[in-house]
Image (cartoon, rainbow, N blue to C red):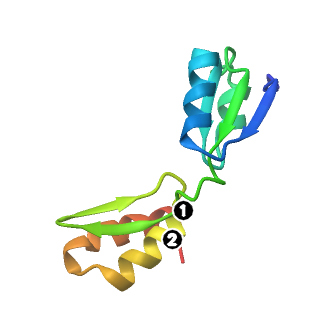
Amino acid sequence: MKVFRPEEYVFATSAEQVIRLLKEQRDRALIIAGGTTIHELGSRGLLEDVKTLVDITKMNLSYVRVENDSIRTGATTTFAELLNASESRFGPELAVLVETLRSIRPM
C-alpha cells in the first residue's frame, strides 16, 4: 500500500487564498473539506501529483438555505446537518433526500 504524504497542508481562510494556491500549484493542489476518503485515494496511487491539500473547513461554508424553489448547501455541510435541516424544514417533496441521507448515515 502506498503512503500518501502531501508536502503542504493549508487551512484556507478566504476564497482569495484558495484561488491563489490553485493558480500557483495547478494540478498539484487539491481542495478538501474534511478529507474522509483522501488517504484511501492516495493509497491507491490516485493522488501522486498532489503536493498541497487546501482544507476549506474553516471558511464558514456549512449551511443549508432555501432560496426560491431550490436548496443550497455549503461545501462543508455534513450529511448530519443536511439531514437535520431536511427533516425539520422541508416538506414531503424532499422525502427522497431524507431517505437517502438516512441510508448513508443511519440515525
In three-dimensional space, the C-alpha distance between marks 2 and 1, rounded to whole angstroms, equals 5 Å
Instruction: Please name the residue shown 72% across and 36% down the image.
Output: 39
Name the image quarter holding the C terminus: bottom right
Residue linked to disc 2: 81
Q: Is residue 96 left or right of residue 42?
A: left
Residue linked to disc 1: 78
Please provide percent x and percent y for residue 95. Answer: 27, 74
Q: Is residue 94 left or right of residue 74?
A: left
In the current view of this chain or complex, which residue is farthest to the front? 16
Identify the element where label 1 is drawn.
loop
Instruction: Please name the residue shown 46% across and 78% down the image.
Output: 84
Please provide percent x and percent y for residue 88. Answer: 38, 85
The answer to whether mark 2 and mark 1 are in CB contact below 8 A is: yes
Q: Is residue 45 left or right of residue 66?
A: right
Instruction: Please name the residue shown 51% across and 60% down the image.
Output: 77
Amino acid identity at mark 1: Thr
In the current view of this chain or complex, which residue is farthest to the bottom? 88
Please provide percent x and percent y for residue 32. Answer: 61, 40
Please provide percent x and percent y for residue 38. Answer: 67, 37
